[in-house]
Amino acid sequence: MSQSSAAQDFVANVQAPQGAVASLAQEGQEGMGALPVPTRKSERWKYSPITAMLARPLRTATAPEGWPGDVEPNPVPGLDAYRIVLVNGHVVPEACDLPVADGVVCMPWCQAVEEGHLADLDWSGYHRREWVGAVHAAHAQDGMFLHVAQGVTLDRPVLVHHHTTGDQVAACPRHRIVVEDQAHAEVVLWHSASNGATGMVNGVLEACVGAGARLGLDKVQHEEGEVFHLAHEHVTQGKDSTFRIHSMTVKGHWVRNELNAVQEGQGAHTIMHGAYLPKDREHVDNHTTMDHTVPNCTSSELYKGILYDRSTGVFNGKVFVRQEAQLTNAYQQNANIVADAGASINAKPELEIYADDVKCSHGCTVGQFDEEALFYLKSRGIGDKAARALMVQAFIGDVLEGMGQEEVAQEVETLLADRHGWS
Amino acid sequence: MLTIKNLHAQVEDTPILNGLNLEIGPGEVHAIMGPNGSGKSTLASVLAGREDYEVTQGSVDFDGTDLLDMDASERARDGLFLAFQYPVEIPGVSNLNFMKAAINGKREHQGLEPISAKDFLALVKEKSALVELAGRLRDRSVNEGFSGGEKKRNEIFQMAMLEPKLAILDETDSGLDIDALRIVSQGVNAMRDAGRSFLVITHYQRLLDHIVPDFVHVLSEGQIVKSGPKELALELEEKGYDWIKEPAV
């Protein structure tokens, strides 16, 4: 038995999707057979082995009977947003609140496929590059399709809330966002999971941001249980467009975020910011690729992590500046605090620059709490715990501040405060 | 207020304080002078509770409690304040949130409710005016981007906010121009009263023209080798430290 077929056993009991997406599933199946299964031997997966995920067979996540009563469809107090909600990869229509406006198409992804809104199901090609992408494609379920027509600004953000519940579920949500020229959309991607939930969330989001268009994503992972969470976002940007993502991992048993942004038009600007604060034995991996392919573009990348207990983290930030991409201005910063002796981070900036007239700066730090600053705070009567909380809030403050929706940033801070005993 | 008996302290096996004795009564201002390396800043650090310093012998009684048994934040809540020689910059922590946390820490210790936003801002306004920092603390991080003089004024502002029983000023005059020195000294003098004591650590007599002490002590090799009235500072300024060689018996 080959290695890959043994690995595939973990999804042997998961049904392949039918209907309009069967062709994508077929390609996924082929990819699973052809692509190498990630192991510690491959650089990209060295610090995030998926052995434990493969060890326990998953099962098909059947369509839920409505939205779970003990979970808020909108988990963000005060957030005024349209809403599309999913449980285990299935849209729950009765709990959705979709926008109805001229120039806006927002519907479940499967419906969009059936109605022919997606000419190219396999557009990002993730399932042809990565085995886990092929696993996703082979079991792709449903998600959000959002299309904002030229010049249209969505009046409220769209909240996409995915909830995972149950034992050994396989959830493969798939989203597509198209923001046409001069259009603007803000999206909140919220991931939750029930206490005791196990299995895999393997999600893909594809987005096209047109010329002069803007797309902002506030992504929050706040999952109970022991779910393996694989996420891939693939975004292309046109001329003078702006794409922003804030990727906040509040809680997650095992998380691998893989974010790609490709600038295809001059004058594009990309913001990739994120924060991760794992504790216990949690694992959070952020792999990012910033691809500058044309001249006169800018990017700003800032990831900050605080690692507690015996948690582990990975940051890998690739920045490509292609030969054509003169006058690129790329910035990358990754700062980490290893708060406890048992925690660790593997941080690796990777810059590949082929153009000769560019400005690229990057920095990567791994340290402990600043003892001198802690002493200063304590010398004013602030207790150890409160002093550390102030320092942590200051450390991740510049990531939180840049988020698109203030209510989301506030809720992230509240959840972190509860979790880490700051409040 | 403060009774130090036979205090010995070391950093990484290097003894710095070697049997220091000092008694500070309520309302008194004591100055400690001494050459570089005599242990002045170590004394300040040990009293404030810096963890790198190990006390190997002796005792420190602070208003009836064993000071050495408390951590830095407990000492502060009990009324001890250290004005740092080198105030620390803490990017991202706002001055006002910092002070609010400090005040509420102390109030919690005293069994009081957290201070109201209105009272807090009124207090900030009053105390920051004392050191001519009014309106310049809001929206700024703790000491970030402050000039040397502003940092020292911010120390005195914090002292005024927290109203300690005993304030230790560790070379507060270092790096100050004459105007900043005047402002800082005015702030300190405004806080002098019968219940509050000061320990002023300085290398130069200059500061003591502005903050006039009741007692002056000379520290050398980790011991107080001479004590006297305020005039002792002038004598030191004139003659240097060399004439005091032998520890007083």
Image: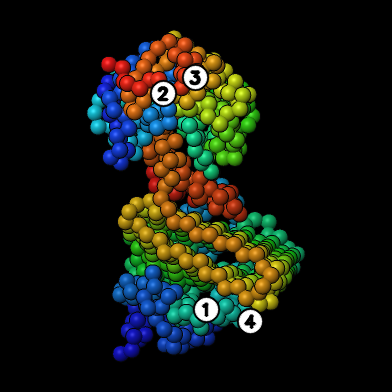
Which residue is rendered at x = 60% and y = 20% of the image?
A: B182
Q: Which residue is mark 4?
A: A119
- Contact? badges 1 and 4 (CB < 8 Å): no
* Number of the front mark, 4 or 2: 2
- Work out how far the residue at label 2 is from the one at label 3, CA to CA, in angstroms: 11 Å
Residue at the limit of the structure toward the left, as seen here: B57
- The quadrant the C terminus of chain A occupies is top left
Query: Label 1's element?
Result: helix
How far is mark 2 from mark 1, CA to CA?
78 Å
Name the amino acid type tagged 1.
Answer: Tyr
- Residue A183, horizontal then vertical, whole percent: 72, 64
Does any portion of residue A141 appear in the rendered image?
Answer: yes
Residue matched to label 3: B237
Residue A290 at x, y = what percent? 58, 69
Callout 4: few (<14), some (14-19), or many (20+) C-alpha neighbours within 10 Å?
few
From this view, report whether residue A7 is shown above or below residue A107: below
Question: Which residue in the protein does label 2 denote?
Answer: B242
Residue sitting at 39 percent across and 43 percent down? A421
Residues A272 and B239: in front is: B239
- Is B131 left, or right, of A384 in this rendering? right
**Location of mark 1 (residue):** A126
B212 above or below A145? above
Q: Secondary structure at mark 2?
A: loop
Residue under the image location 58 percent in, 28 percent down? B176
Which residue does the image show at 47% across and 57% down from the upper left? A365
The way the protein has been coloured in the rendering is rainbow
Marks 3/4: CA–CA distance: 88 Å
Mark 1 closeness class: few <14, some 14–19, many ≥20 residues within 10 Å:
many
